[in-house]
Image (cartoon, helix red, strand yellow):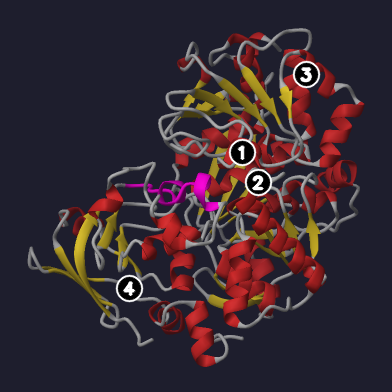
């Protein structure tokens, strides 16, 4: 798998404090490890129609504290399984953010005003190498602070498992 | 400049003389644990990485507590895989009936002040009551820690919260932490290590302290920690039978913020749906009709919580279904021995076996559409305990018991 550094997709807008129970409810996640089965229930308790609106490659655009609550790693895995290519947010909860790096779901923190200016359906282009996000529909661009190189490499090579399969070990062990 | 508690633990674990907020380090972990909600996925990651051997089977502990006993055949299969791994690897597994990981770990003597603990559960921060830098992670981080004994960390800023004054009447540390979360908000302590200090901490039992550190997760904290001084060591000896060493921050440690809370001014608090930081005094919610009360969880399933509920329910009858679940077998046995289970059962409560119970929405008292519950647990997100159209109000064990008696949210100060 090559490094995924350029991501283009349509914006799906969400609000503040989207917790991991919303992303995948405990009612389901204890029963199976099969993410495609769980994906059918993604965001069900937030908005049961959301999954049907998502098209492969779409980018989630969220407010503050995205992914708060439970440590369940099923959350970023299910987001990948429904076809989301990246998540941008005003801020992330810490366990969710680590999980994104570990499962290879690009997650980017953007300034509040830029997030607010994105409307559902806007076409976004994320350049992880340069650290920029462009709203192609509105002609706006913003820079973001990249992760340290080793973590960026983990995230963009598909996460810990893919990285270990490819390199034989982690950057530090 | 001296070091905070978090900085001391991380520096030692990373083999460095000192660390500063923002530093990225790779640290050795002292203990890793997971449960039936998180470990099955960690096991899959270990298999996919081709690393199924734990780095040290003595320092890894597993629990079947989230869906225990198993409510479905699918979950039974995940439990089976955990038992097989435990058998093969020699890793200790606390099976169905032992209780919730965060309670069983100190009861079984795994916890020592100053440890760096990695738990595949967001409420791992609970162990900060014992002076540990204990952080919640996902399944892949747990898999890496289990197989390598290492974790990468960004050194967090530390915030100090000074607790002053004494709690009044049936007000508990649950009300204190709900008040703090309501003030700082759900992301107010994101990425930070929060240390609770002050004279008031000295009066608190370990059970009461654990309620505070437990809910640090609900304000985004990476760790919540309390100093282990002379009185803490006494409490740990009395409640857990453990002899531990003192563990304190340096007196000139640098905190990015210092806050204060006066416990004597805190009243019974309620966290209202749909978020934990929508916190209001109980009198503003009085009269809200409920269908169920739940007393239990890693937040409030300890003996003093059951005692407080029993003191309110003794000789009376609950008006709505009231589910009481002790956090561990040890607590269950003591509650049987001292008559608490009898008092609760005669009052009409269902007393369940030690487990996480309905808190995680897996089993044992899930809510239907439109139903309303008071719960002593830690999260009130829609769908958390069943149907997405159910409402969950988070309260102390005293408020839960008083509300169960009246069938509506009630002020426990009327009963104590």
Asked if residue B193 is positioned above or below residue A16 in the image, the reply reads below
Disc 2 marks which residue? Answer: B67
Q: In this orientation, does residue B349 appear? A: yes
Q: Which of marks 1 and 3 precedes in the sequence?
A: 3
Q: Are the residues tagged 1 and 2 within 8 Å (C-beta)?
A: yes
Query: Chain letter of disc 2?
Result: B
Chain containing the residue with disc 4: A
Q: Residue at x 38, y 86 (%)?
A: A1
**Of residues B72 and B53, the one drawn nearer to the viewer in this rendering:** B72
Residue at the disc numbered 3 = B345
Element on which disc 2 rests: loop
- Between circles 3 and 4, the one closer to the viewer is 3
Which one is earlier in the sequence, the residue at label 2 or at label 3? 2
Crowdedness of circle 4 by 10 Å Cα count: few (<14), some, many (20+)? few
Q: CA distance from mark 1 to mark 2?
A: 7 Å
Q: CA distance from mark 3 to mark 4?
A: 57 Å
Mark-to-mark CA distance, 3 and 1: 20 Å
For the residues tagged 4 and 1, is the chain the same?
no
The magenta-colored residue range is: A16-29
Q: Are marks 2 and 4 in contact (CB under 8 Å)?
A: no
Q: Residues within 10 Å of mark 3 (few under 14, many from 20)?
A: some
Placement of B146 over or under B83, stated as above or below: below
Residue under label 4, please give it: A145
Relative horizontal placement of residue B397, taking residue B157 as reference (left or right): right
Question: Given the image, what chain letter belongs to the residue carrying mark 3?
Answer: B
Q: Is residue A22 magenta?
A: yes
């Amino acid at each position: 798998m090559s490094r995924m550094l350029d991501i283009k997709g349509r914006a799906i807008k969400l609000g503040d404090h989207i917790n991991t129970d919303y992303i995948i409810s405990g009612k389901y996640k204890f029963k199976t490890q099969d993410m495609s089965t769980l994906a059918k229930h993604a965001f069900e308790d937030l908005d049961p129609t959301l999954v049907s609106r998502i098209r492969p490659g779409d980018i989630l655009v969220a407010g503050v504290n995205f992914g708060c609550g439970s440590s369940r790693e099923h959350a970023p895995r299910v987001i990948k399984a429904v076809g989301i290519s990246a998540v941008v947010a005003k801020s992330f909860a810490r366990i969710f953010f680590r999980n994104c790096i570990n499962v290879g779901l690009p997650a980017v923190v953007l300034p509040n005003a830029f997030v607010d200016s994105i409307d559902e359906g806007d076409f976004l282009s994320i350049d992880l190498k340069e650290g920029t996000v462009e709203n192609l529909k509105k002609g706006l661009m913003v820079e973001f602070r990249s992760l340290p190189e080793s973590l960026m490499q983990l995230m963009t090579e598909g996460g810990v498992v893919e990285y270990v399969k490819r390199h034989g070990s982690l950057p530090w062990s | 400049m001296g070091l905070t508690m978090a900085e001391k633990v991380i520096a030692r674990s990373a083999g460095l003389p000192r660390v500063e907020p923002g530093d990225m380090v790779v640290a050795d972990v002292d203990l890793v644990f997971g449960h039936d909600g998180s470990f099955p996925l960690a096991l899959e990651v270990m298999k996919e990485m081709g690393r199924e051997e734990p780095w040290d089977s003595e320092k890894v502990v597993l629990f079947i507590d989230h869906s225990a006993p198993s409510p479905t055949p699918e979950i039974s299969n995940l439990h089976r895989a955990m038992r097989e791994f435990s058998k093969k690897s020699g890793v200790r597994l606390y099976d169905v009936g032992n209780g919730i990981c965060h309670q069983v770990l100190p009861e079984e003597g795994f916890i020592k002040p100053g440890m760096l603990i990695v738990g595949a559960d967001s409420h791992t921060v609970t162990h900060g009551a014992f002076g540990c830098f204990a952080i919640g992670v996902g399944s892949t981080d747990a898999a890496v820690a289990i197989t390598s004994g290492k974790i990468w960390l960004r050194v967090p800023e530390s915030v100090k919260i000074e607790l002053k004054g004494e709690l009044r009447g049936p007000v508990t540390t649950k009300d204190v932490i709900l008040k703090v979360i309501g003030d700082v908000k759900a992301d107010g302590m994101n990425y930070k290590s929060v240390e609770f200090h002050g004279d008031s901490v000295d009066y608190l039992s370990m059970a009461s302290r654990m309620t505070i550190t437990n809910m640090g997760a609900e304000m985004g904290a990476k760790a919540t920690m309390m100093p282990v001084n002379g009185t803490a060591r006494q409490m740990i000896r009395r409640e857990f039978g453990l002899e531990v060493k003192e563990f304190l921050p340096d007196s000139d440690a640098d905190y990015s913020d210092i806050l204060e809370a006066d416990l004597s001014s805190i009243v019974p608090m309620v966290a209202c749906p749909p978020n934990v930081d929508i916190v209001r005094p109980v009198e503003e919610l009085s009269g809200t009709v409920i269908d169920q009360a739940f007393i239990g969880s890693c937040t409030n399933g300890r003996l003093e919580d059951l005692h407080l509920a029993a003191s309110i329910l003794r000789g009376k009858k609950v008006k709505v279904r009231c589910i009481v679940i002790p956090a561990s077998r040890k607590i269950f046995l003591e509650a049987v021995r001292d008559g608490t289970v009898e008092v609760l059962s005669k009052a009409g409560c269902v007393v369940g076996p030690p487990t996480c119970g309905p808190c995680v929405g897996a089993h044992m008292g899930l809510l239907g559409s439109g139903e309303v519950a008071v719960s002593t647990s830690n999260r009130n997100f829609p769908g958390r305990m069943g149907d997405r159209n159910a409402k969950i109000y988070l309260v102390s064990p005293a408020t839960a018991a008083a509300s169960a008696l009246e069938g509506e949210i009630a002020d426990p100060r009327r009963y104590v």
